[in-house]
Structure formats: C-alpha cells, structure tokens
Amino acid sequence: MPDSIKQTVQWFPGHMAKTRRLIKESLNLVDGVVVLLDARVPYSSQNPELDDIIRNKPKIVLLNKCDVANPNATALWLKHFEDKGAYALAVDCKSGKGLNKFEETVKKALSKTIERNAQKGMNGKPLRLMVVGIPNTGKSSFINRMGKSAKAKVENKAGVTRQNQWFVVGNGIELLDTPGVLWPKFEDREVGDKLAFIGSVKDEITDKETIACRLLESLSKTNPQAIEQRYKIEGVAGLQGWEILEMIGRKRGFLIKGGEIDYERTSVIVADEFRGGKLGRITLELP
C-alpha cells in the first residue's frame, strides 16, 4: 500500500486543448469573463494561462462551493482577487447563496461597456459573458441557477460540458458556457493532488487509494481534528496517510476476507465525505 502513494497525477484530455482555442476564438463575442473557482482551492483551481488568454476583458471571479470552505479563508481570497483588480463573490451555485449579488456585480464590472453602448444609442444591449473554469467547479450549476429557462447539463463528474453553449438568463445578461479547462500537466504535484481531492480530476484516471492517502496526510498536518471528529479516532497527527486510512477502515468495519482492510471502499468514502463537507468547512490553501 505505501508504495502506491508515489504516483503523480497528470491529465490533459485532447478536448481541453480544443477548449483553449475556442476560448480565444470566442473572446470577441463577449464583454467580460466569469471565472468559476473552487473556494477550497482557489489557487489550484485557476488555469495559469487564463489571464493571458482573456487579456483586458473585465473579470468576475466566483468562489463557488463556499458552503464547504472555511469562511475566514474565503474572505482573504475575496480581498486577494479584488486587490488584483477583479470583481469577486463567494457563492454556492447549488443553493444559490451569494448569486443575488451577481447582476449588480456584472453592471459594476461592465460599467464602461454599458456607457459605450448608451453613447451609441444601444441602451439595453445584452451584456455577454463567457463562463470558464476547470472541470467540476460548478459552471453548469451556476448557469442553471441564473435563469429558469437556462438549462445546462449538470453532473458531479469532471468534464461533462463538451461544446460552447449560449444561455439567456434574463436581466439583459447572456452567458456563454465552455468546456472545462486544464493545462497540459501539473508541474506542482500538490496542485494535481488538490484537484484530485475536490474531484476536478476524474476518479477513473487516478488511484483512489493514493488520493485518499494524500488527502488524509495533508489534513493530518493542517486539520487533524477534522479527521478525528468525523471518524471517531485519535492520534492522527504525524501519521502517514495509509496508516490513517487503515484506522478509518477498521473503525468503520470495512473489512474483506481474512480481516484485511477494504482500502478501495474506505478510500471512496473518505473522498466523498471530504467533497461533501462532512469533515467540516475546510480550505486547503491561502493567498
């Protein structure tokens, strides 16, 4: 078991190279860009090429899934993005939390565009925004929340959206949905790990036990109490990930023939419960 945690996560499906090209081609169609990030990993869930691609287009950052992120950390990230000149909101696209401020934020971010349209006699011209983000950050949930008639395919798996789609969400705002974007490989293994922790890397192409071990080992250093409280175990600080995984498996009674730990079942439970916020509101990185 311990040997398996040396694996490195690398993933760049071919459709994502196409997406990068589509974004560049579609920029002329929009007035601004909405960037969906995961509030638990705002740094790791950014595409490092995106700012270069969108250039001077106004940017609105949505820190999605704020309901499972540490609120104090989210406040720091909001200030970080605002200090860099972006407009930022903490939201939860499934429940709609925070999205009541979206229209107001769009009008602030695109105030110059609105003014130019007015000078040209085009008051009321729709404001068009491209929605971008890496897989599983909640783009489709966001679009569905923004308009009753706007229906984008939603599924809790990475890479569901495959082509550009326009959605009229009312109040003079139109959204262009794009497929998820990732870069060719994760130069920093920690970034790859964090994306796997939150489900932005497909579970099918990673080793479930490896990811669960790395997640537990990371949390044991920063939030050991979260593991201990959830799984009713003690003394996880300083342990290796596979040791904690064994403790959880035994505590939950996930055993197979011969009394061995069912590592796969335990790993799936750990990942699912972290992603669902059952270990608490945890943010894995700060600005």
Image (cartoon, rainbow, N blue to C red):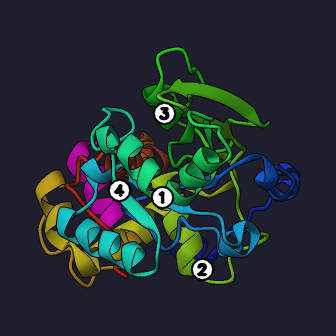
Pair 1/2: label in front? 1
Q: Is residue 261 visible?
A: no
- Asked if 59 appears above or below 177 in the picture, the reply is below
Spatial CA span between label 3 and label 4: 16 Å
Spatial CA span between label 2 and label 4: 28 Å
The residue under label 1 is: 109
Residues in magenta, as a range: 243-253
Could you say whether the residue bearing mark 4 is in a helix, strand or loop? Answer: strand
Majority secondary structure of magenta residues: helix
Pair 3/4: label in front? 4
Spatial CA span between label 2 and label 3: 28 Å
The residue under label 4 is: 89
Amino acid type indicated by mark 4: Leu
Amino acid type indicated by mark 1: Ala
Pair 1/4: label in front? 1
The residue under label 2 is: 189
Amino acid type indicated by mark 3: Ser
Pair 2/3: label in front? 3
Amino acid type indicated by mark 2: Arg
Quadrant in the picture for the C terminus: bottom left
Q: Is residue 272 visible?
A: yes
Could you say whether the residue bearing mark 2 is in a helix, strand or loop? Answer: helix
The residue under label 3 is: 141
Pair 1/3: label in front? 1
Task: Answer with mark 1 or mark 2, whichever residue precedes in sequence.
Answer: 1
Pair 2/4: label in front? 4
Q: Say which quarter of the image contains residue 184.
A: bottom right
Q: Extreme top residue here? A: 149
Task: Answer with mark 2 or mark 3, whichever residue precedes in sequence.
Answer: 3
Task: Answer with mark 1 or mark 3, whichever residue precedes in sequence.
Answer: 1
Counting from the top left corner in percent of width and height, residue 261 is at 39, 52
